Structures are given as structure tokens and as C-alpha cells.
Image (cartoon, helix red, strand yellow):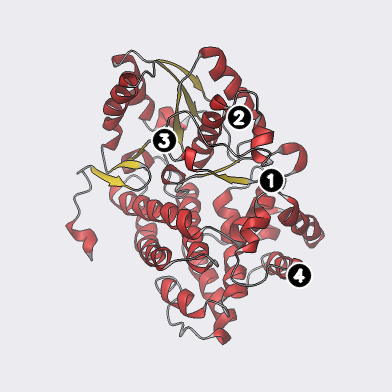
């Protein structure tokens, strides 16, 4: 396999829409990035982060030094939580405007980076709110410069144009996608991810798998999305058990991070459908639910639901985690069972009932799928018709395991 020829300590520059510094030690590139920001007139930035990971990982030491070395003033909004809210975005924007920030540096996983992207938009549209942004009441065409320093290997948000936030008052968790929020630069340094817990390691990697399963099977899927899906799933199948077995080893993190990057580019091209459209209501209603765990609970039933329409594609891309499928429509139930078996084998055994959901919640969840801004767009590109009955069935089948 090609991985054997890779020196994980050699920093590569990967050009997608975003320039990504990738590899162990990539965090040192923040010095060059800061220098370029200053040369372009950026003398003040807001650093958006969670409460602790940006320091625990060591990322903050490099960022603070680079900003000081280049004479860039900064404030740190360090209040982002998992499943970030529009309230937090508005608060960060207020602080950024008062300080005079001209760019955003986001340090963290999907939540801080998505928050940072949202702040960057609202710095350019200062008469707008986060609620207006996420209820799709305007379509931004510009944003302040964004630098993303990624601390997880799952979301792919550091290489694409997507962001997500929750409107707590309405139980809405919409997604936005605008070209103006591709980060100018991103840093993917696997050494920064060796402090992730076992569950974080599992859930973020499962997020990457979901990205490519959906992107490769949507109505707008391209051969490129399918190719990315095959390699993403192969890498996760190979390296996730190794990462879980030795959480502080950067080598399996490197390849999981690359898989996540491929997944981020993959769904930037093929987009998403059922699993994400159905998970967003779950973590909107229960903000403490990890996004990746929600996806894991749903994935087997989604695979079963779409298999008849995309049997050949799914049999091919799922081979590393669901071996032996022939790619015929009659294997739908078997495909769902095999995917669930793999999830259980890596230690993710929870289903919706384990997290407190019951059949009485299903109608509300289904309604949120069809009323939350943006989610109808995801459902519209599912490989089969996303009826309320089909969505309901996926939720109901995700309550308990297929494999008893």
C-alpha cells in the first residue's frame, strides 16, 4: 500500500480550494501565514476556539507566538461548544467588531471552525445576525479571511465551504455553503490530534465515512466523489483500530486525517443527503449528542434505505467495512447489517434508544427534517425519493440494533 512510502514528518502543501499544510509539524506554518496576513494589512484578528483543546494540544503556543512576532493584535473567543449556536456566533461577532478584527483564526474541530466561518461572514455584513444567516435570509458573497487550524480528523470543514450552527429557540440545525468561506489556509497536523479521547477518535472518523457514503450516492455524485469515497473508507478501516489502540501515535492519525480531508473534499463535490439531514435534528434536540455518534446510529438504516438504488457503488466503496457484497439490490438488509457489525467491532454500539430517544420522538424529528432551513435541499438529492414515510422508517430502524 502507498502508505508505506510516506514520511509523516514531511509537511506537504495540498491545494484544493484551500491551501492546506498537512503533516506532523504543520502547525509551524502559522508563522508564514501570520506574516502573509500582516503583509495584506491584517493587524488585528479574532481567534475562535473551544474552551480548552486549543491550549491542551499545544496549538495556541504556536499561534500566539506567530501573532506576537508579526505585530498582529488578537482577542480570543474561547466559548465555542459542541454543536455551536447562533447565540455564540453573535457574541463572538460583537467582540470582533468592537476590537476591530480584520480576519479570523479558528482553532478546533468542526464547531470552532464553523463558528469562525460564520463570524467571518458577519464581519463583512455587520447589519446581519447569525439567525438571518442560518435561516438563509441573505446569501453572502464575501467574508473576512479565514485560517483554520484543525484539531480533529472527521469534519473536513477546513477544506470546504460548509458550516453548521444551531438555533436553539427553534430546534433548527441548518447548514450553509458559500464559496466565500473556504479558508484561505488550513493546518492539518496529526500531532495536534493525539490528545483526542477514544470516543472522539471514533466519532470523528465515522463522520468522515458518512460524508463519503452520502457524497458518492447523491443525485449529483461524480466519479471523483466515488473515488474519494473508496480511499476514505479504506483508510478509516485500516487505521481507526490502530489509532484507538494507541491514542498518542501520530502515524494512524496522519492517515485518518488524510481520510477526513478526502471526505471534506468529497462532500464539497457530491454533497450530502439522508444521514446528515436526519442527524441534525437529533443533535439540535439534544445538543450534548456528538454529531459523529448520531451519524453512526443512523448509518446502517440509511445504507439499507438507499442500497437498491446504489447497490453497485455501495458494494464497491463499502468493501473494507462490509465485505462480500455483490452489488445487487436484494442485498439491502445484509448491507445495513454489515455496516452495523463494523461499527460495533470498533466499539460504537449505541443506538437511538441508548441515547434517550423513543418512538414518541420520531414525528417531531421527521418534521424537523422537512422544516429546518437547508435540510430539504439535502433530502432532495437523496438517491431515492425522501418521503416522510422513508425518513420515519430510518429513524425507527435506528432505535435498536439490527444485529441482536
Q: Which mark is residue 148?
A: 3
CA gap, disc 4 to disc 2?
35 Å
According to the image, label 1 marks what residue?
A: 284
Give me the residue at 58% from left, 24% from top.
92
CA gap, disc 3 to disc 1?
24 Å
Marks 3 and 1: which is nearer the front?
A: 3
According to the image, label 2 marks what residue?
A: 89
Across and down, in percent, residue 146 comes to 43, 32
Mark before the other along the chain sequence, 4 or 2 = 2
Provide the secondary structure element on which disc 3 rests: strand
Left or right of 372 in this view: 236: left
CA gap, disc 2 to disc 3?
16 Å
According to the image, label 4 marks what residue?
A: 389
Q: Are marks 1 and 2 in contact (CB under 8 Å)?
A: no
For residue 404, say whether it is visible: no
Provide the secondary structure element on which disc 2 rests: helix
Mark before the other along the chain sequence, 4 or 1 = 1
Q: Dot 4: within a 10 Å radius of its alpha carbon, few (fewer than 14), some, or many (20 or more) residues?
A: few
Provide the secondary structure element on which disc 4 rests: helix
Q: Are marks 4 and 1 in contact (CB under 8 Å)?
A: no
Give the camera-side residue of 349 and 392. 392
Mark before the other along the chain sequence, 3 or 1 = 3
Q: Are marks 3 and 1 in contact (CB under 8 Å)?
A: no
Provide the secondary structure element on which disc 1 rests: helix
Across and down, in percent, residue 111 comes to 54, 39
Across and down, in percent, residue 277 comes to 64, 56
Quadrant location, the N terminus: bottom left
Q: Is residue 274 above or below residue 72?
A: below
For residue 163, say whether it is visible: yes
Q: Is residue 189 above or below residue 331?
A: above
Q: Quadrant of residue 58?
A: top left
CA gap, disc 1 to disc 2?
16 Å
Amino acid at each position: 500500500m502507498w502508505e508505506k512510502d510516506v514520511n509523516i514528518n514531511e509537511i506537504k502543501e495540498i491545494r484544493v480550494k484551500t491551501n492546506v499544510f498537512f503533516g506532523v509539524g504543520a502547525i509551524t506554518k502559522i508563522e508564514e501565514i501570520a506574516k502573509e496576513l500582516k503583509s495584506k494589512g491584517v493587524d488585528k484578528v479574532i481567534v475562535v476556539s473551544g474552551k480548552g483543546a486549543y491550549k491542551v494540544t499545544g496549538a495556541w503556543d504556536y499561534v500566539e507566538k506567530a501573532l506576537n512576532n508579526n505585530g498582529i493584535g488578537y482577542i480570543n473567543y474561547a466559548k465555542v461548544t459542541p454543536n455551536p449556536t447562533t447565540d455564540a456566533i453573535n457574541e463572538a461577532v460583537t467582540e470582533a467588531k468592537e476590537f476591530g478584527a480584520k480576519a479570523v483564526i479558528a482553532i478546533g474541530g468542526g464547531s470552532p471552525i464553523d463558528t469562525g466561518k460564520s463570524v467571518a461572514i458577519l464581519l463583512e455584513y455587520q447589519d446581519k445576525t447569525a439567525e438571518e444567516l442560518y435561516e438563509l435570509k441573505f446569501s453572502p458573497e464575501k467574508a473576512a479571511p479565514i485560517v483554520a487550524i484543525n484539531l480533529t480528523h472527521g469534519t473536513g470543514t477546513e477544506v470546504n465551504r460548509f458550516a453548521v450552527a444551531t438555533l436553539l429557540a427553534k430546534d433548527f440545525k441548518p447548514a450553509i455553503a458559500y464559496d466565500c468561506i473556504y479558508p484561505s489556509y488550513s493546518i492539518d497536523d496529526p500531532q495536534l490530534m493525539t490528545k483526542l479521547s477514544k470516543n472522539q477518535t471514533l466519532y470523528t472518523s465515522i463522520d468522515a465515512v458518512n460524508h463519503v457514503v452520502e457524497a458518492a450516492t447523491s443525485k449529483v455524485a461524480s466519479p471523483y466523489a466515488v473515488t474519494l469515497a473508496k480511499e476514505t473508507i479504506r483508510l478509516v478501516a485500516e487505521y481507526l483500530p490502530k489509532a484507538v489502540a494507541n491514542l498518542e501515535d501520530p502515524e494512524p492519525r496522519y492517515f485518518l486525517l488524510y481520510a477526513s480531508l478526502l471526505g471534506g473534499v468529497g462532500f464539497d463535490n457530491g454533497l450530502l443527503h439522508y444521514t446528515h439531514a436526519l442527524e441534525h435534528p437529533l443533535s439540535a434536540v439534544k445538543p450534548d449528542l456528538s454529531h459523529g455518534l448520531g451519524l453512526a446510529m443512523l448509518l446502517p438504516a440509511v445504507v439499507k434505505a438507499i442500497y437498491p438504488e446504489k447497490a453497485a457503488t455501495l458494494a464497491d466503496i463499502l468493501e473494507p467495512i462490509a465485505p462480500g457484497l455483490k452489488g445487487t439490490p436484494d442485498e439491502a438488509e445484509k448491507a445495513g447489517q454489515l455496516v452495523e457489525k463494523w461499527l460495533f467491532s470498533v466499539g460504537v454500539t449505541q443506538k437511538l434508544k441508548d441515547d434517550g430517544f423513543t418512538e414518541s420522538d420520531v414525528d417531531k424529528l421527521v418534521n424537523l427534517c422537512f422544516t429546518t432551513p437547508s435540510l430539504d435541499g439535502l433530502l432532495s438529492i437523496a438517491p431515492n425519493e425522501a418521503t416522510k414515510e422513508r425518513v420515519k422508517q430510518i429513524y425507527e430502524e435506528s432505535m435498536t440494533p439490527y444485529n441482536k
